[in-house]
Amino acid sequence: MLELRPNCECCNTDLPFDSSVAMICSYECTFCKKCVNEILENVCPNCGGGFRSRPIRPKVARRSGTSIEHQPASDKRVHTTYSMDELKSFSESAKHVKPELR
């Protein structure tokens, strides 16, 4: 089950469970759309993969036990350990390769 991390690992903006601007890679690294597009250029700085929109967990349990109430989002904030220059340099090395070919 997805953790639904609460913030962008780059700019630290809040990304609540129902955010429409939260993006994740296959390892659940979480960034906002602005950072993915303008800084990372769709290259995850942790794994080199691409990003997709993070799914939104339902507010209402339409099936027993399946809602944000039953499986709450994570409250653990995650921050990148890389500098802005390191992030940009890493994305530059892979941004021209489609994510499915990386």
Image: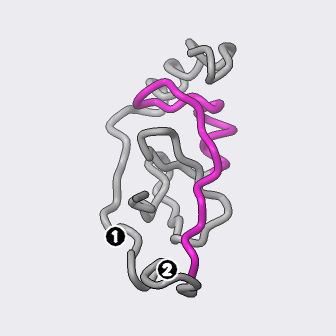
Q: Amino acid at mark 2?
A: Ser
Q: Main secondary structure of the magenta part?
A: loop
Q: Tags 1 and 2 in contact by the CB under 8 Å rule? A: no
Residue at 67%, 64% in the rendered image: 20
In this figure, which residue is indicated by the disc labeled 1? Answer: 75
Q: Position of residue 86 (x, y in %)?
A: 44, 24
Crowding at mark 2 (Cα within 10 Å: few <14, some 14-19, many 20+): some
Q: CA distance from mark 1 to mark 2?
A: 16 Å
Q: Position of residue 90 (x, y in %)?
A: 49, 20
* Vertical side of 42 occupied by 61: above or below: below
**Residue closer to the observer: 67 or 29:** 67
In this figure, which residue is indicated by the disc labeled 2? Answer: 67
Q: Does the magenta-highlighted stretch encompass residue 28?
A: no
State which tag comes first along the sequence, 1 or 2. Answer: 2
At mark 1, the secondary structure is loop
Magenta stretch: give its range: 33-59
Left or right: 61 in relation to 100: left
- Looking at the rendered image, the quarter that the C terminus falls into is top right
Residue at 55%, 71% in the rendered image: 57
